[in-house]
Image: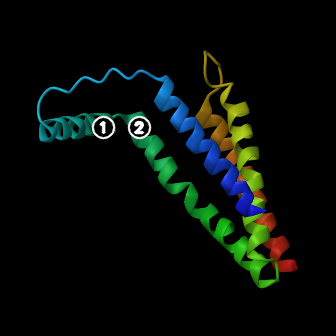
Amino acid sequence: SLGSFMAFWGWLFLGSTLWVLGVRNDEYTAPEGGVAEQCVAAYREMLLVLQLPAVRSLALVLLTCKAPLAAFDMLVPLELQASGVPKERLALLTTVMLPVSMAAQGYVSKGFSAGGTGKPMIVFCRAYGWRLAVGALLTALVFAL
């Protein structure tokens, strides 16, 4: 059930956190200057990074790519609920898909890290059209029910 699933992962998270707390020896050194000075320096550095062209183009893509997908991602579960699918089934589907999603991301990221020759933005742009097509297909399928 969903309760036992959440309890299992909650206890696992708590156990791993306590294990890291006991095993890891953290060597903390107090930073120089006050908190206000550090915040100002961090924001100044952030503004410098935001002026880079690659960062601006990536931000534009990431901020705009989710808008068309939001309709699919919100509409399909609502229509499934309206057609009689219980919320518990939809929640269970989400918990099952989380490990699948993480495994897929891990598999794809191998080509981009550790000296991989892939170009992540090209792969993202190619996959985005397929994601839109699948979303439109799912929406049409749900409305046909």
- Residue 119, by quadrant, is top right
Left-right relation of 12 to 139: left
User: Quarter of the image containing the C terminus?
Assistant: bottom right
Q: In the image, which disc is placed on residue 55?
A: 2
Give residue 144's quadrant in the image: bottom right
- Residue 93, relative to residue 45: is it above or below? below
- Marks 1 and 2 close (CB-CB < 8 Å): yes
79 or 118, which is in the foreground?
A: 79
Picture disc at residue 60: none
Q: Position of residue 60 (x, y in %)?
A: 45, 49
Q: Tell whether 128 sits left or right of 15.
A: right
Residue 51 disc label = 1
Q: Position of residue 18 (x, y in %)?
A: 52, 36
Name which residue lies at 46% across and 23% down. 24
User: What's the residue at 15%, 26% (across, down)?
Assistant: 32
Q: What's the residue type where badge 1 is placed?
A: Gln
> Mark 2 belongs to which amino acid?
Val
Query: Crowding at label 1, few (<14), some or many (≥20) Cα neighbours within 10 Å?
Result: few
Crowding at mark 2 (Cα within 10 Å: few <14, some 14-19, many 20+):
few
In percent of width and height, residue 81 lies at: 76, 79
| Of residues 140 and 74, the one drawn nearer to the viewer in this rendering | 74
Residue lying at 64% horizontally and 43% vertically, measured from the top left: 12
